[in-house]
Image: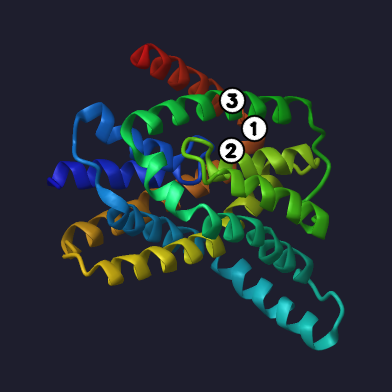
């Protein structure tokens, strides 16, 4: 990988990971558009760890409070503070964990095959973009993330499992599900970002295990640069997305998805 390749992929990951436009789809598309060699799962892992570091750093105070209240709820055997939200994050992670284990080989092989990947990303970019727009346009905005119940967490968690399909967008589908449940835009986004933490940790653990078993040479310099760049860009994106989401709504991202989908359709056919 050249330096330009590393920088562009890292910045792309940082921008797209927490916006509802699919980071995995963009990481798969860039090599196809530029005729670069696929960067591989190892580099994808490095930039995902970078965005994980960004979301942990941004929500560090919230995470300390959630962990404290969750432990207190275990001791008291009753809700304490934000323990309901902590339980919701844990429960919402279960469906994608199970789906990831069940379909791991398909995701890492068949769905990364160039033409299959582009066709899949085209369909999901358009389809889930329309769904995001409909949910944001018609759903009421009345609930905060403190009102999330177990069944809500499972619903959003099942939606998150769909994001294993390239182009769906993990943040996009979880925000769509949150808006369908009546969460405010900022609440749906915040819950989506918190859900990203355990999911990324689990995915990173599995990928690291695979890399260790393969015994392949690791270009540590590229991985480190990619991780640091993606972390910095992602931190800025989280801040401004949460700051402006109630004002902007989801329509700019819906429009982007539809335009990108139309470009991909023209490219394919």
User: In the picture shown, does residue 35 fall above or below 190?
Assistant: above
Q: Is residue 189 visible?
A: no
Instruction: Identify the residue position indicated by label 2 in the image.
Output: 244
In the rendered view, tell whether residue 168 sits above or below residue 44. Answer: above
Which structural element holds mark 3? Answer: helix
Q: Is residue 259 visible?
A: yes
Measured Cα–Cα span from mark 2 to mark 3: 25 Å
Q: Are marks 1 and 2 in contact (CB under 8 Å)?
A: yes
Mark sitting on residue 127 = 3
Residue 112 lies, in percent from the top left, at 36, 41
Q: Which mark is residue 247?
A: 1
Q: Nearer the viewer, mark 3 or mark 1?
A: 3
Residue occupying image coordinates x 51% and y 52%: 103
Q: Helix or strand or loop: what does disc 2 sit on?
A: helix
Q: Quadrant of residue 249?
A: top right
Cα distance, mark 1 to mark 2? 5 Å
Residue at image location 65% in from the left, 42% down from the top? 175
| Rendering coords of residue 241 (x, y %) | 54, 42
Residue found at the far bottom of this picture: 75
Q: Residue at x 79, y 88 (%)?
A: 75
Q: Nearer the viewer, residue 46 or 70?
A: 46
Q: Earlier in the sequence, mark 3 or mark 1?
A: 3
Q: Residues within 10 Å of mark 3 (few under 14, many from 20)?
A: some
Observer-nearest of 28 and 65: 28
């Amino acid at each position: 990988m050249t330096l330009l390749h590393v920088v562009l992929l890292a910045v792309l990951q940082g921008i797209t990971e927490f916006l509802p436009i699919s980071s995995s789809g963009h990481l798969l598309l860039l090599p196809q558009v530029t005729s670069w060699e696929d960067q591989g799962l190892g580099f994808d892992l490095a930039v995902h760890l970078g965005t994980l570091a960004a979301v942990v750093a941004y929500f560090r105070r919230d995470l300390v409070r959630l962990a404290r209240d969750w432990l207190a709820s275990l001791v008291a055997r009753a809700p304490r503070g934000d323990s309901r939200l902590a339980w919701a994050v844990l429960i919402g992670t279960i469906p994608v964990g199970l789906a990831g284990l069940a379909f791991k080989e398909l995701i890492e092989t068949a769905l990364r095959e160039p033409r299959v990947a582009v066709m899949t990303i085209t369909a999901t970019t358009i389809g889930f973009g329309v769904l995001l727009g409909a949910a944001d346009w018609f759903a009421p905005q009345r609930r905060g993330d403190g009102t999330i119940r177990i069944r809500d967490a499972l619903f959003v968690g099942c939606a998150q499992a769909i994001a294993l399909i390239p182009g769906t967008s993990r943040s996009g589908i979880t925000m769509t599900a949150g808006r369908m449940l009546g969460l405010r835009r900022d609440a749906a986004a915040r819950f989506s970002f918190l859900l990203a933490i355990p999911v990324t940790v689990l995915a990173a653990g599995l990928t690291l295990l695979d890399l260790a078993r393969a015994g392949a040479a690791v270009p540590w310099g590229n991985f480190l640069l990619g991780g640091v760049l993606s972390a910095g860009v992602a931190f800025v994106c989280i801040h401004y997305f949460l700051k402006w989401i109630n004002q902007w709504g989801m329509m700019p991202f819906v429009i982007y998805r539809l335009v990108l989908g139309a470009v991909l359709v023209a490219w394919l056919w």
